[in-house]
């Protein structure tokens, strides 16, 4: 496969919308009062799922790019603290950070000076740039599905 075609396919996967909802679609129109609600039978609220996505994506990205990055403790460092209400400031900051980091992952995928199949020099054995990009896409797709299911359970999905 041509390198540029692979990179284009990775960008499409990261942006989503081909086989599942995009992050923007999963969040659009969400009523603020439903952000921290856990419907019966569902383990996490939309806030918890989304903030988990943000934290995990940030960790994968920083791990990939920064040899001095220290990952949070697992699993507690990858989930938000329980909160009764999510403020508009908390929500807006999380959404902005998520999309900024996603764009940075996309830029990495598009960067032709990076050999996607090369191991990350400071990473664990076998961890390539391609592995980390795919991990972001896979993890985001899974949790976006969780968000959509939660919105359906809340009666807040078209």
Image: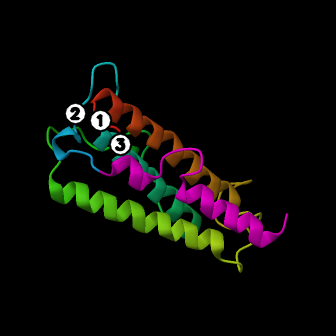
Q: Residue at x 75, y 72 (%)?
A: 4
Name the residue nearer the viewer: 19 or 88. 19
Say whether marks 2 and 1 touch (CB < 8 Å): yes
Name the residue nearer the viewer: 81 or 110. 110
Find residue 99 and report its horizontal and vertical position in percent.
41, 63
Q: Quadrant of residue 13?
A: bottom right
- Mark 2 residue crowding within 10 angstroms, few (<14) / some (14–19) / many (20+): many
- Mark 3 residue crowding within 10 angstroms, few (<14) / some (14–19) / many (20+): some
Numbered range of the magenta stretch? 1-28
Outermost residue toward the right? 1
Q: Quadrant of residue 109?
A: bottom right
Left or right, 7 with reference to 21: right
Outermost residue toward the front? 158
Number of numbered markers: 3
Q: Residue at x 42, y 48 (%)?
A: 53
- Mark 1 residue crowding within 10 angstroms, few (<14) / some (14–19) / many (20+): many
Task: Give the residue number, with chain letter if any, for mark 3.
Answer: 79
Task: Give the residue number, with chain letter if any, for mark 2.
Answer: 37
Left or right, 105 with reference to 110: left
Residue 128 at least partly seen: no
Task: Give the residue number, with chain letter if any, for mark 1.
Answer: 45
Find residue 129 and report its horizontal and vertical position in percent.
67, 63
């Amino acid at each position: 496969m041509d390198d540029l075609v692979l990179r284009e396919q990775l960008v499409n996967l990261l942006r989503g919308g081909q086989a599942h909802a995009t992050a923007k679609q999963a969040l659009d129109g969400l009523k603020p009062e439903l952000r921290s609600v856990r419907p019966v039978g569902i383990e996490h609220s939309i806030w918890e799922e989304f903030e988990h996505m943000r934290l995990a994506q940030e960790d994968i990205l920083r791990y990939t790019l920064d040899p001095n990055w220290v990952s949070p403790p697992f699993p507690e460092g990858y989930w938000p603290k329980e909160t009764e209400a999510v403020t508009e400031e908390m929500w807006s900051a999380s959404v902005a950070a998520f999309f900024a980091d996603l764009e940075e992952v996309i830029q990495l995928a598009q960067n032709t000076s990076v050999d996607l199949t090369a191991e990350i020099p400071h990473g664990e054995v076998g961890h390539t740039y391609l592995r980390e990009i795919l991990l972001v896409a896979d993890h985001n797709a899974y949790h976006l599905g969780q968000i959509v299911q939660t919105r359906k359970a809340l009666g807040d999905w078209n």
